[in-house]
Each structure stands twice: as structure tokens, then as C-alpha cells.
Amino acid sequence: MASLQGRRPVRGKIRPPQRKTNTESQFDKTWSTLANAIITIHEQKAYTLSYEEVYRCGYNLVIHKYGERLYNGVKDLIEEHLESEAEKKIVPVLGLADTSPAEGVQVLKAIQKLWKHHVTCLLMISDILVHMDKNYVPQSRLPRTYDMGLFLFRDTIIRSPKHPIHSHLQMVLLNQITMERRGDVIDRGAIKSCTEMLLEMKENNSVDSIYVSDFEVLFVETSREFYRVESDDLVRQFDPPEYMRKVESRLDEEQLRCSHYLTEKTEPKIRQIVEQEMIAKHLKNVMEMENWGLKQLLVNNRLQDLERMYRLFSRVTNGSKELQEGVSSFLKECGKAINANVRESSIENTEKGVPLGVALALRWVQEVLDLKEKFDIILVSAFAKDKSFETAINSAFESFVNLNPKAPEFMSLFIDNKLKKDFKGKSDDEVDTILNKTTTLFRFLSDRDVFERYYKQHLSNRLLHGKSISDEAERGMITKLKIECGYQFTTKLEGMFTDMRVLTDTMTSFKEFLTNAVEPPPFELNVTVLTSTFWPVPTTPVSCNLPGDFLAATRVFERFYTSRHNGRKLTWHTTMGNVDLRATFNARKHELSVSTMAAVVLLLFNNLPDGEALSYATIEQETGMPPEHLKRTLQSIACGKFKILIKEPKSRDIGDMDTFKFNAAFQEKLSRIKIQTVASKVETAVELKETQEKVEDARKHMAEAAIVRVMKNRKSLDHNNLVAEVISQLQGRFNPAPSLIKKRIEALIEREYLERAPGDRTIYNYMA
Amino acid sequence: MAASTGESEYVTLESSDGFQFIVHREAAMLSGTVRNMLSSAGQFTESTEGVIHFRDIKAVILEKVCKYWYYKARHLNSVTEIPHFEIEPEYALETLMAADFLDT
């Protein structure tokens, strides 16, 4: 340690560097060297300079605290230079821009040239003033030399207070762009370098480029004006498809313009303007145009144009919504037309007294299906499967389908028809697609319980008369309905199938039973045993006095059946049966296949002497059938294609005073004649009322059941919540009216299932 | 780069008292100032001639500076312990000033 301490002075002392005298004259001398150097740089003769010398000047000035004077000196020098350059090189060409817009490019080029030169000089100057930038500039919070130079260019050239450069520059740029929009070819390069220059220069905050304030704002404004005028013109000149093509190409054009010679940042702004001016403002106009507006595009399936419309309209707020509304109102119109068609024919027919034909129902469903298919295609290929469009389309369908009060019946008839006839010889796939389409229609129905009732009716007809072509298709349909509406909906339908299956077993054992029977019936008897709750049969059978033989036969079966299934009650429904009769006419014998009721009527003539007639009243009395059934039966055998009976007087309808006699002269080629009972058809007004009553009744039960279910669960609930919950439970089947629910609640209170809470009358309590 | 522009691998540094030091261009470029001199867009005389005249730096100091460049170049990115760079106290201040000027 001691030795170290001893050594220190020996190493010599730190010598201070030689002090330089720093006087004014020193400054002047150094500065003038530097100033000359800058001028040399501006003259593009930097190669004659020694960097070391110039740098040393700058360095020394800063070290000797002349930073401020140096900085300002440099600034003044650059400014001076720029001003003289502006005067020499830019001002002379400004006039060109005034005379011809095309020549305006010269202004851009002149400014550009000066800019490039300026930037190179600035780079060199900031190179030699590195020391100042690093030391003096940060402590005085000034822009660095390079940035200061850019500001100078901005303030002395672009925004020159002396010369109208600013306005000319803007004018030229905008003119050029407008020229290009009109289809001229312009010097894109010149504009691109100009926008790059503007981007390079910043506002005083050093963040925003002057491109925005000095150009973009104005550009956006003029573009708005341009497109306002242009869109007005185009809308007047072209039809919507063409107009939309033009809009689309404009949008592409603007996007390309931004990427080619403006900046990406401008793109959303200009896009918004084009969208606003060309799409949003003309939205309604374009859609509602007489000639090739939305309606005609839809009518003619112009998928491409629709797709374009969708794409363009989706760009603006509300656009897609407006389009949806347009589509949906068009759809509703179509639906109305379809409905009106049906109504018109129905009025025509009811006037003539003819019941609505099946054909009408089929036509309605087919038309709806066609419409649906059309819109499915449009949705997929024009609206990009847009979910909101799908909902709009579906709800439009829903609204008009349910406007037709006969919709559930029509749909069921449609399926009935398909299952009875149309599926003959069709592959499973074809059947499946048709059923699928029908199910989609079914989805639009709100009164599903009504549909169920009709479907049951039609299904029972098909099953009992063996008219169904394919069991598989029937089951397929049921499965689809099950998927749509749940297990509950189809239990009864499935029960009907089960009954039909059990039937074969029952009949084989019945035949066995007959071989041992004491008094077998005088004819072959086939009985279809139906579970009464599954099938749409009237609770009390239609009265009909069976002849002795028939009666005996039913007794035999009853004996057989009760022996096997104790406690079951059989009710005979003569309305649903068939009888094969052998009838002897003058010409030959024929086998007649008729309904049970017709057989009962015909057998009356069996014991009658030839040529004797029976009056309507006698027949009515003998058979005991209610008039409407009797009349229908008589109609089928006396007024139909095969006239087994001759009616006096001859007419289509059966009157109370008519008389009938056996048509012994009946002739027909076929030996076996099937006399159709009145085929399934759209209901008459009376039947309709009946059905409606039945539906109403069923709805009451469903509503009550739902109310009890909810209340049992909750024990106590206020009115509004109860109604809401019941509605949500029932919605799958039908749309219950709150008033219906209210009435049901009252009925339940009366029957003491519920009570009003003492104190608060809006709350109900469940009474166990 | 050296080959394409005809630049030599070396540069000559000349002190205020007339001594010349021929050093690797790469080493000299470790000085911000020298780097600017040789690579500025301005094509100053130094970059065209490859000779830099330091009118304010004496040979003793310039030699020290050159030594330092090589010292730095050798130990740049080195992982082992870096030996001490010796500066004689009597030259310390002037070396410091030169370093500031050269931005080294």
C-alpha cells in the first residue's frame, strides 16, 4: 500500500488540454467555414469538402456554447436556400396548372425534384452536424436537424406564405385523380411520390403527417361531391344490376388507387364515402326501382345480381336489414298471391256448391314448396347463407303460411296424396327429399295440433282402406314429425300403426275360432280392431241398422274377442267398413265392392219385386242412418260413375222426396266394380266447423294440463308468469291466446285445482 | 463492399503533427465520426481519398485511439474476461477529448 501511495506522484499529473481562446472572431471564422460548406452541399459539390474540417467546426461551436447560434444559422441558411429555389423552380410552373389540368403534373414534378434534392442535402447536413444533434438539440428540446429541415420545407414550400403553392398542389392532385376517375390515364408515379413526400412531412407534434391535413381531408370532401353527382347520374342512367356493377367497379378502383398511389390509411375513409354516397343513399331507390329492382331480380332468379346486391348492401349499416325487409315483403306478396289464388277458387267452387278439390290443396302446397325451393337456392348462392336472411325468409314464410287458415289441412292432404299416389315407383331417396321438403313447410305451421288432427284423419283413411303405397314412407314421415314435435305428438299416430300390426294376428286366430264355432257367419268377416283413443273415430258410432246377417256376424266376433280380451268393449263403426256384394243384373253378374253403409242400403232392394222403387223416407227409416251419411251413400251408388240405383228425378243431389229403384239394366265390362266412397277432400264448411270445435276442445285440455303441470311444480305463481310459462310449453303445438289461458285458469279455480291467494288476487296457489 | 467501390481495406489517419496511421477501415469505423465521414451520402473528400486528416489530434493520442479501436474490435462480443485498457494519466484528458470528438 505504502509503495503504491508512493508511486502515485511519480506517474505524473493529468495535464489540462490547451485552452483555446474563444472570441467572437473565432466564432465568425468557424461559422463562415461551416456556412460555406452548407452552401457547397446545396450546390451538390460536397465532394470538395473535408468532412473532418466541417465536422470539427460544428463540434467546436457546440463545445463553446454557440449551439443556439449554430442551430439558428443553419436554419436560416436552409430556409433562404429553399425560398430562392421555390422562386426559381416552382413558381414559374404554377401557371401551367392553371391553364391545363393535364400540365399540372409539371408542378408535382418540380416540387418533387426540389424535395428530393432537399432531402439529400439534409442528410448530409445532419451528418456533419451529428454532434449538435446529439448534444445541443436534445437539451434545448428542438427538432433534430433533419426534422427541422422537413419542417422548413413544409412551411416555406408546401405551405408557402408567399406563393400559392399549397393551393396549386392540392388542386393538381385532385384534378389528376378526378381525371383518372373519368377514365383518363395519368402519371401515377408522380402522384405516388408526391403523396409519399406529404407522408414524410409531419405536423409540429411529429406524429401526424401533413398528408392528412393538407390533402386527405380535401380529397375526401371532393370525393364525396364527385360520388354524390356520379351516383345520381348513374342511378338515372342505368338499371339496378348495371348500377351495382358500376358501384362495385368504383369500389375496386378506389381501393386500387389507395394501394397504388395514396396510402392504405385513406382506403377506409374513401370506401366509406363511396358506400355512403353510392349505396346507402340510393338503397331504397335501387331496390324499389320499377325496372329490374329487387322484385324483378327475385322473380327472374338473377342470382349474380342478387349476390352483388347482397355484397354491396351489406357494406353499409342498415343495408342488409333493408334488403332483408325487401326480400321478406316480396315473399309475403308471393304468399299472398298464392293464398289469394286458393281463396278465389274456393269462393268460385263454394258458389257452385262443389267442395274444395284436393287438387287445390295440392296446388297450394306445391306452390309454397316451389317458392321455398327458389328461396333456398337464392339464400345459398346469393345471400351466402346469411343467418339473418334465413330467419327473415323463414319468418316471411311463416307469416303467410299461417295466413291461410286451411294450411294444416292442405299440408296433410298433400302428404296424403304423395303417400297414396305419387310415391309409386319412386326411389327411397326421392321419397325422402319430398318428405323433407314437406317437413320444412311443416316447421312454418303454428297450429300444429290442427295439422295433427287432419293427419290422423288422413292416415286412418290410408291405413283402413289399404291405400298407402309404402309402409316405409309412412314411417319415415312419422319419424320426421317426431323429430320436429317430439314423442307426444306422434304417439297416437304410432299407436295406429301398432293396431294395424296386431290386426293380422287377431284375424288368424279369429279364423281358427270360426272353424270350431257353432254358428259361423254366412260370409267372410274381417274386423279391424282399433284403439279408440288413437284413431279419429266418433265416440258414438253413426247409427245404422244392420241387416240380420251382419248383426249375427258381429255377435260372433264379439264373442270371440271378449273371450280373448276380457273387459274390452267393441263398438262397430259402419262408416269405415267395406262389403263385397255379388249382384245379379240383367246382363251379367257383377261383384260390387262398396262401403258397409252402401251395402246396407243395397240389401234393402234384395227382397223387392222387380221395378219396385223405394222412397227416400223409407230408406231412411229402414236403415236408421243420419241424413247426411245416407245422402252421401246414396249419392255414391245412384249418382256416381256406376249407377246401381236409378234415382227419380235425375239430379246430382239427393232430395228428401226422391225415389230409388234397382238398375237391373246396368252394364259394365269389368266383372268387379269398386264403388268409391266419397274420397278424401277438403272439408265442407260444416266439417270445418266440427274440426275447429274439436281442435278448440283439445286445446282447452292441453292448456289446462299445462297450467296444472306448471302450478304443481311451482305451488304458487302470479298470473303473468303463469301465462308466460304456459305459452312457452304449448308453443310447439299451437299459439295459445292469453285469453284462452285466462279462461282455463278460471275454470280450474272453479273446479278447485287452484285458488287465488288471499290478499293478492294476482297470485294463484295450487291446491293438492 | 470494399471491392465494388474500389475502396481499400485500410484507411490512413493523419495526426496534427504529421504522423500517419494505416488502420483497418473496419476498426476505424468503430468511431461514429469516422463512420459518418466515410459513409455519408455526401461523398466527402475523406471517403474518396481514404485519408483522414485530424487537425486537432496529436500523434500520441491518435495512436492511443487506434490501439483502443483494435482493443475494442478484439473484445467485442467476447465472453471471457476483458483485460484492462491502460491509459497513461498524463494523456487521459486529451484522449477523452479525442474520444468525444470521434464519438468512440
Image (cartoon, coloured by chain):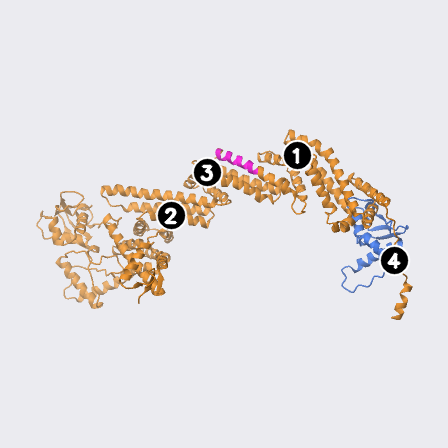
Chain colours: A orange, B blue
The span from disc 1 to disc 2 (Cα, nearest Å) is 60 Å
The span from disc 2 to disc 4 (Cα, nearest Å) is 98 Å
Q: Hey, which residue is sitting farthest left in the picture?
A: A609
* Residue A178 picture quarter: top right
The chain letter under disc 4 is B
The residue wearing badge 2 is: A397
The chain letter under disc 2 is A
Residue drawn at x 50%, y 40% as measured from the top left: A279
Q: Secondary structure at mark 3?
A: helix
The chain letter under disc 3 is A
The reply to whether residue B38 is visible in this rendering is no
The residue wearing badge 3 is: A285
The residue wearing badge 4 is: B91
Q: Residues within 10 Å of mark 2 (few under 14, many from 20)?
A: many
The amino acid sitting under disc 4 is Tyr
* Residue A101 picture quarter: top right
- First in sequence, mark 1 or 3: give its number: 1
| Most common secondary structure along the magenta stretch | helix
